[in-house]
Image (cartoon, rainbow, N blue to C red):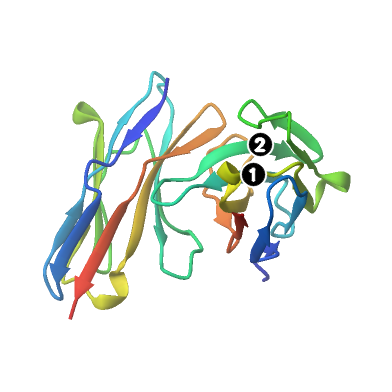
Amino acid sequence: AQKVTQAQTEISVVEKEDVTLDCVYETRDTTYYLFWYKQPPSGELVFLIRRNSFDEQNEISGRYSWNFQKSTSSFNFTITASQVVDSAVYFCALSGGFKTIFGAGTRLFVKA
Amino acid sequence: EAGVVQSPRYKIIEKKQPVAFWCNPISGHNTLYWYLQNLGQGPELLIRYENEEAVDDSQLPKDRFSAERLKGVDSTLKIQPAELGDSAVYLCASSWSTAGTGELFFGEGSRLTVL
């Protein structure tokens, strides 16, 4: 069975702090894909990144970076120098065998 | 390019009433999903379509929920009769990928309140 665990329910930081959102997954598939989505207060989930199981290279996009470690089944997301606009719920997702499942999400509050 | 369009955004009904949600996916996306999102939780898959065929409806409560995707484009999700526990956000998503390898593009969701 597939499972995505986001142990952090809520995180609160002050603007300009760095913050890491944790994601741990379980799957028996050898080929799978991992994703992060952002859900701002407006409600629409927005895709941030996709990683396949054969690509463990970390990725950086502006203030966002992702650390994929198969050895620990983790796909963590770091926001550097957080901003108020980063306040949202962030979901980690796993896709293998056609079905995409989501974690419960981490709500991030960035205070000015 | 237009994104995934859903309507209505909000719906308030009394229990036992029927309700329907409509979704128009991104043009060219053959895969369409309906997800249910309860407050404080992640989206849970209800049904997945490849063109007009429902290829995964194992999580759809078929006693009261139904869905269709005529002509393989837009889709309708219906609940009849609605129960108090159906209050949630119903999300539609589409993807260019037919194998679950691609990212999902979501609509704004339809928030249902059952009184």
Q: Is residue A78 left or right of residue B94?
A: left
Q: Does residue B4 appear in the picture of this structure?
A: no
Tally the numbered discs: 2
The amino acid type, in three-letter code, at marker 1 is: Tyr
- SS state under label 1: strand
Q: Which residue is mark 1?
A: B33
Give the residue drawn at x 59%, y 59%.
B109
N-terminal label among 1 and 2:
1
- Quadrant that contains the N terminus of chain B: bottom right
Residue A34 x %, y %: 39, 40
Give the residue drawn at x 76%, y 52%.
B20
Give the residue drawn at x 69%, y 54%.
B14
Q: Does residue A37 appear in the picture of this structure?
A: yes
Depth check: give the residue in front, B113 or B56.
Answer: B113
Picture quadrant of residue A53: top left
Q: Is residue A24 left or right of residue B51?
A: left
Q: Which mark is residue B47?
A: 2
- SS state under label 2: strand
Residue B67 x %, y %: 77, 41
B8, above or below B74, in the image:
below
Callout 1: few (<14), some (14-19), or many (20+) C-alpha neighbours within 10 Å? many
Give the residue drawn at x 57%, y 50%.
B87
Depth check: give the residue in front, B96 or A107.
Answer: A107
B62, above or below A62, in the image:
above
Residue A83 x %, y %: 23, 75
The amino acid type, in three-letter code, at marker 2 is: Ile
Callout 2: few (<14), some (14-19), or many (20+) C-alpha neighbours within 10 Å? many
Q: Is residue A109 left or right of residue B12?
A: left
- Quadrant that contains the C terminus of chain B: bottom right
**Label 1 – label 2 distance at C-alpha:** 6 Å
* Chain at tag 1: B
